[in-house]
Image (spheres, rainbow, N blue to C red):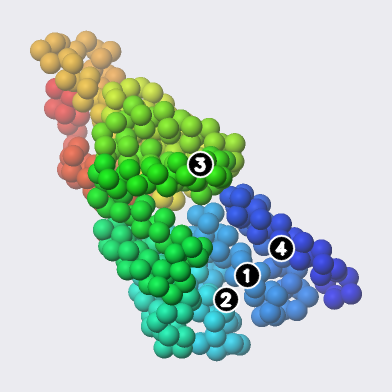
Amino acid sequence: MQENNFDSTVLDEMCFEAQRAQEEGNIEIAIDLFSRLAEIWGEVEGLRGSKAMVMRGFLGRALTDGRRYEAAETVLAELLIDRESILGPDHEQTFVTRGNLARAIAFGGRPEEGIHITRMLLADRERIYGADDPRTLNSRGQIAEFYASAGDNTKAAALFGELLADRERVLGPTHWDTERTSQNFIIASAQANPNSETIGALRELVDERVAYYGLSDPQVITQYALLAELIAFSLGDPLAGLGMLTVVVAERTKLFGPGSPPTLSARRSRARCLILIGQFDDAVSELEDSCVFADEESIATDLVGLGLRMDLVWARMARLDAYIEESVGEEFDDDEYDWATVELWQAWSDWISVEEGSRWLEPEHGLRRETLRIQEEYGFNQEIEGDGAESNVG
């Protein structure tokens, strides 16, 4: 494309539209627009042109938000090479790209690697800008965020607490970055030590944000979903959590569509509530439908897809256990025995898929720990030979 064949104003408007779509949670739209913008600017000024590199950075971040971690890592790693070559290793845009690459790696299942990259970035920012510079503080926040994504909420809460004190000192209590860190501290504290006090603080935060922004705000509905999960699984009230998560599923379906990762994550949590209150048939149906959506959306091997499959195994085994417990002292007729055998082998087959898909996760990742718990609980670490399913059912 020649420079006289395009209007840069139109491209600027496309960029604004893409950024707005990303903020509103319409990630696929953002990815499509940023992809087109990166291609257009690449044709105009070359892939290493200033505008083209900015769009490549936006695209990498959007791909991460869209859970396309491998693609995001590829885009950002290539961009980092170009940034370092043209701008130098200590330029702020190079630092930004390093941070975004770390984010794609950490959220993609390798949090320790992401934390290591960000710790090196933190040291470089401290060296150049000083410990109290907002950019340095941002790197500290990212490290805490990665610990939270890996399931280490105790470490995350401690880091967010230290960062909050420094941001209040440097930026003041009403600065947006300070308020964001305060929210993250409340959330991580509730997850690290869920009790009436920490969950009560989270409830106050969520109620305040719902009243101000409404449940249709993507960030608010995320916090509302977390509150529902803590009420269901930590405070032991799955029935209350089920009602709240039904609202989350409805809102996310309207915002993102029925097969989007946020919607499927909420459906997974709702299914877990159904398991806990003994509605196993409904839980299995919910998870089976969700797995179909995950396949259709090509996220079957992503963290969301793995979580759905893992819980489908749990739901099948919980349903089977309940059936066996109710049938103690009774003889199975052939139909009942056939159903139980099929249920066991289906769960075993599903487990193989989960195990294969989760091997790329680091051992400390929260989902990996969950798969190991399910494995130990149901003995999936032992091979079934011949007609061994009979002894499990009997």
The image shows residue 188, relative to residue 306, as above or below, that is: below
Is mark 4 in CB contact (under 8 Å) with mark 3?
A: no
Q: Residues within 10 Å of mark 1 (few under 14, many from 20)?
A: many
| Position of 273 relative to 181 (above/below) | above
Q: Secondary structure at mark 2?
A: helix
Q: CA distance from mark 4 to mark 3?
A: 29 Å
- Residue 210 disc label: 3
**Between discs 3 and 1, the one toward the N terminus:** 1
Residue occupying the point 35% across, 74% down: 116
Can you give x and y, in whole percent of width and height, for residue 289 in the image?
Answer: 47, 31
Quadrant of res 1: bottom right
Q: Are marks 1 and 2 in contact (CB under 8 Å)?
A: yes
Kind of element beneath mark 4: helix
Q: Residues within 10 Å of mark 2 (few under 14, many from 20)?
A: many
> Residue at the spot x=81%, y=70% of the render?
8
Q: Residue type at mark 4?
A: Cys
Q: Which residue is mark 2?
A: 79
- List the residue tagged with mark 1: 56
Res. 263 in view: yes
User: Distance between the Cα atoms at labels 3 and 1?
Assistant: 34 Å
